[in-house]
Structure formats: C-alpha cells, structure tokens
Amino acid sequence: MTDLLVHEPLVAEPLDRIARIPEAAIQDAWVRGLFDASRLQTTDGQPVRLVDAGRLNRDSGPDVSDARVEIGGLLWAGDIEIHTSSSAWETHRHHLDSAYDRVVLHVVLTADRRTGTLRRADGSELPELVLLPHLDRSLRALLRAFHLDAATTPQCGSRWREVDPKLAGDWIRHLGTERLRHRAQEVGRAYGQRPDLDRLLVRRMFRALGYEANADAFETLAERVSLTAVRALDGRAIQDRLLAASGLERTDLFDPATSTEPPMRSDAWRRGGRPANAPRRRIAQAAAWLAPAGPLRLDAVATLAEAARAGLDPVLTLLRPAPPDGSAPMGRTRAVRVLADAVLPVLLLDAEQREDPGAEGAVLDLYRSIPTSEDHVTRAFAEAGFRPRSAVEAQGVQQLARSYCQEGRCARCAIGRALYPALDRM
C-alpha cells in the first residue's frame, strides 16, 4: 500500500504540469525531505543513501551545499545541483564551469534525452537521480506546500515587467555595490580587532580557496603559519610546510620556526568531494600564492591593488600561478570567486582607509567587470524579467533577495515602491 501512496498519483502527471514546476519548488522539496528516501537510486542503478540533504546555497554556485550522500556504497561530501530536467545542466552551462565540479549528485524532477549522459567541467561523469517517482505527494500538493510554507523570491515577480528597466537596473546595481561595501565593513571590524591588513588578506584568500566545505580549515591553516618564515622559503618548501601545519601529511617536516601553533588535526578537513577541491590540491595552490612570484609574497595588498588597476585579466593571472608541485593552477571560476569574496573587500577597505578615491574607483570598476554567475536566486529573478549581466547585478539580486524580499522590506525597495505607490507614504 505504501508504494501506491508514493507512486500512483505521480505516474499520470501531465508533461505540461511538470514543465511548470519552478526549480525553487524542487529545491524546497529536496531540503525538506518531501520524498521517500528509502529506495533512491541513480539513473544507472546505483543505490543512494541520503546522510545529509545539505542546505540551500543563497549565494552563487550550486543549489545545495554541505550535502553527504552515499552512492554505490561510497560516501561523498559536496554540493547538489537541482533542475527540472537533465538538459538544464548544459543549458545553464554548468558543464563548462569548474565551480560545479564539486557537485556530487544531480537531482532532476524528470528524465529527458540528456539523462545519464552528463559530465562535469573536469570531464568526470555526473551521477543523477530522478526525484519524481519518489515524491510523497502529487505535484499540485508539492506546489501548494512550496507557496504556503516557503518564501519565494521575488515576491512581486509576476509584476516586474511593469517596472521601468532603468529603475530596476540602477537599483540592483546599487545593491550590488552596497553588498561589496558591507563585506568591506566586515573586514574593517576584523581589522579593528587585529590591525594587520596583510594577514587579513591572507586569511580571507585562504578561506575563499577552501570552498564552503573547508573554508574554516583553510582559515585556521592561514593562522597556523608564520608568514615571515614561510615567505623566505621556495615554493616546494612552502607547500611542504603548509601540508605539515595542516596535519594532512609529512608531519615530520613540521617546524615550530615556520608555524605559530602545533599542526592541525587531520579530521579538521572534509574530504570525499571532487578532486579539484581536494585539500592537498588547494594547499598546493595556496603555496603558489606565497612562492617568490606569487601575489602574497611581498606587500600583498599593494601588489593586488596595482593589478586591480590594470583590469580583470591581469589580476586573475596573478591569482592563478602554477603550483610548485606541477599540479593544475586554480581554475578561472574559482579565481573569480577569490577575487570577489576575499580580495576586493580588502582592497576597498584599504582605499577607504587611505582616502584614495582613485584606488576606490579602480576596485569598483574591477568589480563591475567581473562576469556573472548563476544560481537559483539569479534564475528566479531572470524568470521575473531581470537577468543579471555582471557580478555586480548578480550580487545585487542576492542582496535584494536576502535584505528586502525575505525580510518583507518592500517599502524600502525602489522596485516595491514603483509597483505599489502607497508604500511611499508608509
């Protein structure tokens, strides 16, 4: 009888109804567990055991972060990307984006002609799971649960096409710049507790390098090492010292002279994700930053500020030096993430502290030149009629979603006031 309750209402779901299901509703169903998880399997028949469904990612990148799933008896920790059908993986160009190489499972509502054929940017096969047969309710009930229980973004999306495009664009770009300034303020608070901008830049860059899973571990590693001592070494020696301080291997190389604290515990690191994000590979890339030709070798803030004035390509080249062990440099997508999340807030704070409008303008110009990245929030706004064309606009819709839509601050939103003039009088 359980099988009939789970599957019978879904077999006859019409295709047009499936096509109308928003991806946000499928994401909501996944993280809330609105399905029978007892018999999940990939499209090629491997059993899937859900250890941790993960959490919705409200920033750029894959839809769900910090998931843990066992596929065919092997435990994986990483991200999950969710679409209505398989072909959306390529439509959204995730197969060309190394930011999605950490996706351990592709969850789709229904299969299509691309099901079972998808690959990541690194060429590896992508496991897929079709969720429709396992839902514990009809699609109508699923949508009802989503709209009643989950906040949708943007709330006024059905009317966005009534808004002057220039007003919407200006407001969203303003919010994108506001978000960068908020990050600079966060850096400023940390600087107030420990006024060492060089060390702060290293910490933030290491943290961004660690992705979500190992962000804390990489920041701890940055605190463990003596920058003065490590910067006197060559690239391979730096990599060996970082590995020793990390506790991952070669602890016989640990030298108190190049570390401020004992080695980390090896269980501080999360492993089992995609090879491109393996801690040892990322540590090699961090060593390249501190090597003689790296951006963190000498006067890191000034070095990166000078590169920022030259434009996007020069600064990304500086952020992607060859690791000392001969492994692959950091991907361009990850370098963009490090730039936006770590480098630019520090450079903006530095420019503001020095009261240098030229340097501040260079940072903002560079920010505006960064290409956009796509996630479930930007796609929701694209469906409403605004498709971000740059990182500033992508960050602007993130800021709008978090600080206005989800908080119900329509009266403080330029778009909300344009759609509902009465809000101007509130």
Image (spheres, rainbow, N blue to C red):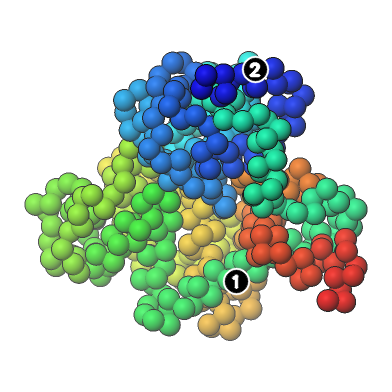
Q: How many marks?
A: 2
Front-most of 277 and 402?
402
Mark 2 residue type: Val
Mark 1 residue type: Arg
Q: Is residue 245 visible in the rendered structure shown here?
A: no
Front-most of 105 and 315?
105
Residue 285: x %, y % from top left: 35, 49
Q: Identify the secondary structure beneath mark 1.
A: helix
Q: Is residue 86 above or below residue 265?
A: above
Which residue, as the protein is rendered here, is positioned at the far left? 252
Question: At 66% from the left edge and 29% from the top edge, which residue is drawn?
Answer: 138
Q: Is residue 282 left or right of residue 243?
A: right
Question: At 73% from the left edge and 53% from the top edge, which residue is drawn?
Answer: 154
Q: Is residue 279 above or below residue 43?
A: below
Q: Quadrant of the C terminus?
A: bottom right
Q: Is residue 258 above or below residue 60?
A: below
**Mark 1, residues whose alpha carbon is within 10 Å: few (<14), some, or many (≥20)?**
some
Residue 102: x %, y % from top left: 44, 38
Mark closest to the chain's N terminus, 2 or 1: 2
Which corner quadrant of the image does residue 125 belong to?
Answer: top left
Front-most of 157 and 4?
4
Q: Which residue is mark 2?
A: 11
Question: At 43% from the left edge and 56% from the top edge, which residue is drawn?
Answer: 208
Residue 22: x %, y % from top left: 70, 37
Q: Is residue 395 above or below residue 42?
A: below
Q: Is residue 263 left or right of residue 319?
A: left
* Distance from the alpha carbon under mark 2 to that under mark 1: 50 Å
Residue 103: x %, y % from top left: 47, 36
Disc assigned to residue 181: 1
Q: Identify the secondary structure beneath mark 2.
A: helix
**Mark 2, residues whose alpha carbon is within 10 Å: few (<14), some, or many (≥20)?**
few
Question: At 13% from the left edge and 57% from the top edge, which residue is drawn?
Answer: 254
